[in-house]
Amino acid sequence: MTASQTASLDVRHLPGLSYSARVGAAEEACEKNLRNLQRLGRSLCNIHLLESERLRHPLSAMGRTIDGDFVVRFRYDDDDPKKSENQFEKLVESLYNAGLSIEARDGDNSSIILFVRLASEEALVAAVYNSRVQDWLHGVCHTAPEQDAQAMLDSAVLSQAERLRIVYNLITRSIDKGGAGITPRVGDWHDVDAILPLHDQEFNKSWLKEWSRKYFLSVEDLTKIRDHYGEKIAFYFAFLQSYFTFLLSPSIVGTIAYFAFPSFSIIIGIVICLWSIIFVEYWTLQEVDLAVQWKVHGVSSIQHVRPEFTPEKETEDPVTGVTVKVFSPYKRLVRQALQVPFALVAGTALGCLITLCFGIEIFISEVYDGSFKGILVYLPTALLATLEPSLTGILTSVAARLTDYENYPTADAHEAALIQKTFVFNLITGYLPVYLTAFFYIPFGPLIGPYLDVLDLLAHEFANDPLHPTKPSMRFQVDEWRLRKEVIYFGITAQIIDQIFEVVVPYVKHRWASYMKSRSTLRRSLSIKLAAKKSVHTVNDPIDEIVFLTRVRNEIELEEYDVNTDLREMCMQFGYLTNFSIVWPLTPLCFLVNNWIELRSDAVKICYDMRRPVPHRADTIGPWLSNLGFLTALGSINSAALIFLFSGDTDSTSVMGRIRSWGFLATIIASEQLYFGVREFVRYGMRQLESKGLMQERRAQFLARREFFNRILKVRSGARGEGINTVTRADGEKQDTRMSEETGCSDSRGEVRSIDRRKGLGKCLRMGREIMRQQASQEKKRQ
């Protein structure tokens, strides 16, 4: 057997042996003919574990095709090859037993790449049918699937996202649920560090080309994203598109207010507050419409148990009767109570750091005028850039461990809890500097000025050269324009910086990595050609797969895409708009331009800078919707407070007098109550509008119930028809005569002795006629 034949060995060609024995025999055959290979991985590099018909969505290489829906990377330990062999065999067996076929390739850097796909078309049909049945049982779909699974699949279009989701569920679902039970870096699968689908380059190119020609996205555009990347990604782009469209009205009003109205105009405050309430309520309904249209409304009720979930016991589900693993909600509630001290500690730590850097920046930029000021002015920025990410990383790690300790059963519940904890950090780091300026620096600047002057004198005493003394700087004065400068920075400069770090930097890193990989690939190609001339086999890719496998390795090295990162960015931007647009009315216009770019840059980021995300289903943007509502309420209070403080004279003395007055507190309370009143009014008005999604869902429910009711009527009418055909009028009369004899009474006497005598159609008619005659005769006698 030659090396090339061994490379394509099929373990099914070794009859009479168990699966493990067949794999072992295949390995021995490879090691015998490829002695220059490493003991693991490379001995299995080109083994085809299964030969089955090609599926509908292959991963194409240049010159050769490798079938696969997902790529799984397995890292092995060169120092402990036996353990790695056992783990690899366990991985392959788990995938095989789940109905999947596998093809292996060298992954470089002590790793193996597995191309995983469904073993047959029949397995795909069964998996899709099972998924549709689960949707119907949980009320996601109101129409029961057809009994013929193949006919059901032929009648409904199977999107690429649904196919990938089904295969991913087979890989990650627990073994008792029919899956392989593989979760990267969890439990026994620490050697599996990546499970991902590969990018469809043709789709990505057409997607970006089409979007580059559009200003607004249609529902059809969003549906294409949903069919390719899944509902979770599609909901983000739908939200961003709706947000972008809604920004048109405050942008126009803000531009007019900037040129026509005075600063801190109450008109722009009312417009922004009302706009934010309408947008949140509109998106709440829009989510339902999209969920119904994409047939995922209520899909959050279908959740798989997390591998990390530790159940307290097993019990029977009172609704489905299925045995489920549960954890006491009371114990989880006690564990959740730890969030309160954690939030206090995290808020205090981040608040102290930001306040310290804020004070240093105020002192150096506005008070200190001594030596090295040109360098020291960057000290606060350097401190924040160094300490804030480290502190936030530590707190995020603690939040993740605390969320794990709370022991949520599903991935969505775990994700939502972690998002809410980290959202506290985002609020503090994002808004605290502006709040310090608005409610501390400007109002109380005259009070802290003397302390800063003393610090300035002390700094000059230590920094002065005795031979060349310098005079202290001029006394501290409050910069009344500082608040506007900070809002402008967050509205323009910070958005540009975020775009650079979000798109440009990853692109440069990816291009550099691709360049280094191309050099490595070139050296490998030259090595293969040289080895071919010498008829010596080297551990390299087949020549016709080099380009494809290089692309696969590059995609594996990319970062995972987390849609919550982009949702967090938009949520924080929404908070800036609702809280601080009153300071600089052009803020909505800046965000409008930024979000037009954001729509396209996020598409570029997903296509080229990130791994292709696994398609996940969702019927909402998750906890970010409640966060938007919170920011809307916070914005209404903050806008009212800023208008009260700065709408008149903006000097520090006047502002300090207002912030100390009872009117300031009364304004906050009144604005809060007004917000809740307006929100309920808008919510009521929105509900009066006919939602297309809800109307479509109600119609589907009605048609499903009517069809079910018609089936029942058809069955019952058939049974009733059989009964009528078997009973004749003569039979009824005979039964009446028999009942009369048994009761000892006669119908001609007109005496009604028993209710049983009214049985039968003929009996009832005769009784009715006799009663009417008797009553008529009695009436005549009375007359």
Image (cartoon, helix red, strand yellow):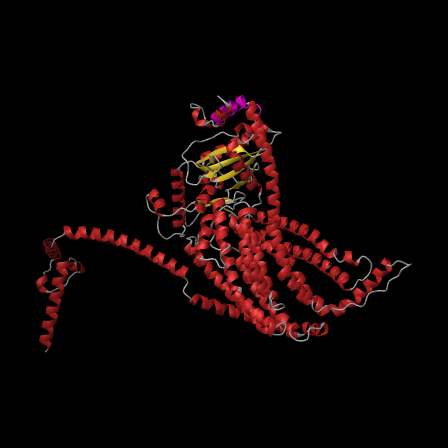
Whether residue 723 is situated above or below residue 677 in the rendered picture: above
Residue 26: within the magenta? yes
Q: Position of residue 79 (x, y in %)?
A: 62, 29
Q: Is residue 193 left or right of residue 465?
A: left
Magenta segment, prevailing SS (helix, strand or loop)? helix
Q: Nearer the viewer, residue 468 or 698?
A: 468
Q: Nearer the viewer, residue 392 or 582?
A: 582
Whether residue 43 is situated above or below residue 550 in the rendered picture: above
Among all residues in the image, which is located at the extreme right?
467
Whether residue 573 is situated above or below residue 676 in the rendered picture: above
Q: Is residue 140 left or right of residue 765?
A: right
Whether residue 194 can be seen here:
yes
Q: Position of residue 245 (x, y in %)?
A: 50, 62
Q: Is residue 356 left or right of residue 217?
A: right
Where does the C terminus fall, quadrant-wise? bottom left
Q: Position of residue 578 (x, y in %)?
A: 58, 65
Whether residue 40 can be seen here:
no
Residue 568: within the magenta? no
Q: Total marks drawn?
A: 0
Whether residue 554 is situated above or below residue 388 in the rendered picture: above
Extent of the magenta region: 20-37
Q: Is residue 632 left or right of residue 67?
A: right
Dividing the picture into quadrants, the one containing residue 40 is top right
Q: Nearer the viewer, residue 208 or 21?
A: 208
Q: Position of residue 637 (x, y in %)?
A: 60, 68
Dividing the picture into quadrants, the one containing residue 342 is bottom right
Q: Image point 42% across, 47% down: which residue?
A: 159
